[in-house]
Image: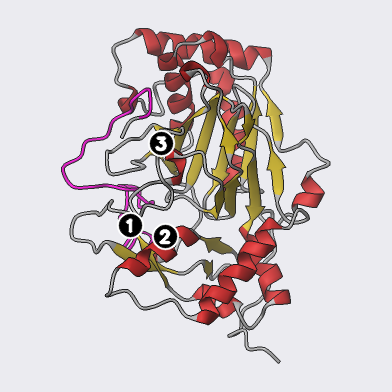
Amino acid sequence: MAKTNGLRPVDGRALWYGSDLAGRTDWLRHLTPSEIEALEAASGRLADSAIDVAAIGPGDLDVPALAPLVEEIRDAVLRGRGFILLRGVPVERWSRRQSACAYVGLGAKLGEPVSQNAMGHILGHVKDIGGDYAQPTHRGYQTAARLPYHCDASDVVGLLCLQPSKEGGKSSLVSAWALYNEMLARHPDLLPELTQPVYRDRRGEVPEGADPWYAVPVFNPMPDGGLVATYVRSTMRKAQRFPEVPRTTPTLEAACDALDALAEDPAIHLDMDFQRGDIQFVSNHWIMHSRTAFEDFPEPENRRHLYRLWLACPDGPALPEVYTRAWQGATQAGRPAGIRVPGVDLSAPLDASW
């Protein structure tokens, strides 16, 4: 019998299978006309003001009509299945600044926007600007490449679609709880490899006093019987460029291969297309996400472009100490602080740049 080091299946609202959700619509939330009107009026006032988008906080989009929507998002993402897709934000008639104000203002109701890169951007841009995903210091969101299943470095990641691609760019989500249970059932000899710290490359985005790599387990069973997970296999591979990092073992490679194969199973993951004006909020602790490669329109103004937020949520799930101690550092509320590089101020550019 394979050794599982006492690991047991997990169960709860964060456990789901794509084959079950594909025929349902409760994860897709259409904004009502009154919600759109309230969001448009409030974000328009913000856009017309002198406020720095990076300084927008939870009180700046204080609209009572949106309070039930915010609570619905919070319940789905932080206490439920781990994601929600909102549809109907009228970005086609807004300026980029108004879209940013509405998006950051809504996100700030859920958590504190934190830096996503070495430049201190709290408003990120998922846009092909010619990056090479094979390069150790390039990020996948700067390319048109397929992104394998992974987690970002925050409590919640949000995406607002300003412009979809000509073809491709499908978003796929998979429950980390389902993957863990399937690994336990199908590959019990390999699962323990993913509950031990694995080394990952910081891709040149190094906090003060930290090494250019760090180690954190993929699956982290919690004392309450739940689970949090984090996985970026590309950074595991890139960490091998450092001679100080232990070499990846064949057993760990086999475990990652098995995990990737499970995530690719259409019975386990859920696919969705982004439409203009969609907002997707996803838990990085309970969900792994992926994107297919895409082809852009030739016109610069029609190129695929999504705004991105990383949010540190005070009411997020309990986390292992390694998340804030050895990996990212912590916000004042004790949540993962994203990527903070010494001497870099937070900013919210309205378009992508190097």
Q: Residue placed at 83% from the left, 41% from the top? A: 23
From this view, report whether residue 142 is shown above or below residue 265.
above
Q: Is residue 61 among the parts visible in the rendering?
A: no
Residue that extends furthest to the right in the rendered view of this protein: 23
Which one is in front in this view, the residue at disc 2 or the one at disc 3?
Answer: 3
Query: Which of the marked residues, 2 or 3, is nearer the chain's N terminus?
Result: 3
Q: CA distance from mark 2 to mark 1?
A: 7 Å
Question: Which amino acid type corresponds to the residue marked 1 in the rendered image?
Answer: Arg
Residue with the mark numbered 3: 130
Contact check, label 1 and label 3, Cβ < 8 Å = no
Tag count in the figure? 3
Which one is in front in this view, the residue at disc 1 or the one at disc 3?
Answer: 3
Magenta-tinted stretch: 323-352
Residue that extends furthest to the front in the rendered view of this protein: 298
Residue that extends furthest to the left in the rendered view of this protein: 343
Q: How is the image coloured?
A: secondary structure
Neighbourhood count class around disc 1 (C-alpha, 10 Å): few under 14, some 14–19, many 20 upward = many
Residue with the mark numbered 2: 235
Question: Which amino acid type corresponds to the residue marked 3 in the rendered image?
Answer: Gly
Residue 343 figure quarter: top left
From this view, report whether residue 119 is shown above or below residue 283.
above
In this view, the residue in front, 35 or 276, is 276
Please identify the dominant SS of the magenta region. loop
The answer to whether 66 appears left or right of 209 in the picture is right
Neighbourhood count class around disc 3 (C-alpha, 10 Å): few under 14, some 14–19, many 20 upward = few
Q: CA distance from mark 2 to mark 3?
A: 19 Å
The answer to whether 327 appears left or right of 144 in the picture is left
Residue with the mark numbered 1: 202
